[in-house]
């Protein structure tokens, strides 16, 4: 059987988005608090682990994001990994709706780096900003993980091919 390789094309933003849609990932909400104590948050699809020692995550955020502004000013943030029942929260925090924190249960434990989404996160990492780099219209923020809450037994929420899903039972 001969495999046929499709003709390659020049990468465009739309083509790259389509390419990445075929790479499912977990769903996270990055949260931070600004200087006035106001909570900010956004659904983040650009998240990956960088190193185990020191434990470090990389998150990508739009340059115009108020959540990014709060992260950079406070020097810290929380990464809330959502469980399979958190789809509505993922959509809410992706929408930019101003009442996100009024309609979603959250709390900020002592020494937390940002709000924890108490109903919808199966695990939360509290991070300190170590450095950041601008790439195009994004700022890539490296966060050293200081504390981890969870994980619970709830399976993670996944996103790929432009739809949400759940990790299949083993």
Image (cartoon, grey):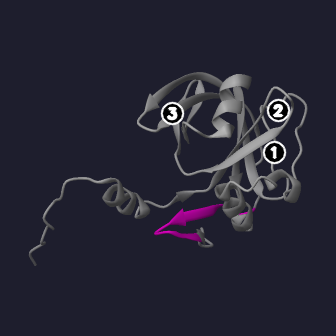
Label 2 vs label 3, nearer the camera: 3
- Determine the residue positioned at 61% across, 56% down: 27
**Horizontal side, residue 87 vs residue 167: left or right:** right
Q: Which residue is mark 3?
A: 140
Alpha carbons under labels 1 and 3: distance apart: 21 Å
Q: Quadrant of residue 54?
A: top right
Alpha carbons under labels 2 and 1: distance apart: 8 Å
Any part of residue 71 in sight: yes
Span of residues in magenta = 154-164
Q: Secondary structure at mark 1?
A: loop
- Would you place residue 70 above or below residue 61 in this image? above
- Residue 102 in the image: state x and y as whole percent: 88, 54
Magenta span has 163? yes
Magenta span has 16? no
Q: Secondary structure at mark 3?
A: strand
Q: Secondary structure at mark 2?
A: loop
- Determine the residue positioned at 78% across, 58% down: 120
Q: Which residue is mark 1?
A: 116
Query: Badge 1: few (under 14), some or many (20 or more) residues near its Cα, within 10 Å?
Result: many
Any part of residue 151 in sight: no
Question: In the rendered structure, are the residues bearing label 2 and label 1 in contact, judged by CB atoms less than 8 Å apart?
Answer: yes
Query: Badge 3: few (under 14), some or many (20 or more) residues near its Cα, within 10 Å?
Result: many
- Residue 13 in the image: state x and y as whole percent: 35, 53
Q: Which residue is mark 2?
A: 112
């Amino acid at each position: 059987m001969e495999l046929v390789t499709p003709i390659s094309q020049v990468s465009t933003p739309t083509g790259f988005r389509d390419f990445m849609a075929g790479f499912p990932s977990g769903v996270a909400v990055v949260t931070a608090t600004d200087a006035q104590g106001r909570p900010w948050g956004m659904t983040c699809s650009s998240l990956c682990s960088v190193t185990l020692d020191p434990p470090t995550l990389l998150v990508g955020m739009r340059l115009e994001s108020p959540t990014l502004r709060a992260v950079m000013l406070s020097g810290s943030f929380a990464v809330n990994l959502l469980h399979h029942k958190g789809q509505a929260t993922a959509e809410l925090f992706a929408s930019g709706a101003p009442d996100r924190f009024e309609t979603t249960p959250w709390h900020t434990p002592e020494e937390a780096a940002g709000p924890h989404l108490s109903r919808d996160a199966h695990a939360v990492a509290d991070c300190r900003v170590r450095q950041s780099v601008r790439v195009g219209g994004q700022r890539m923020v490296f966060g050293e993980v200081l504390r981890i809450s969870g994980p619970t037994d709830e399976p993670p929420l996944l996103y790929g091919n432009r739809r949400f899903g759940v990790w299949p039972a083993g």
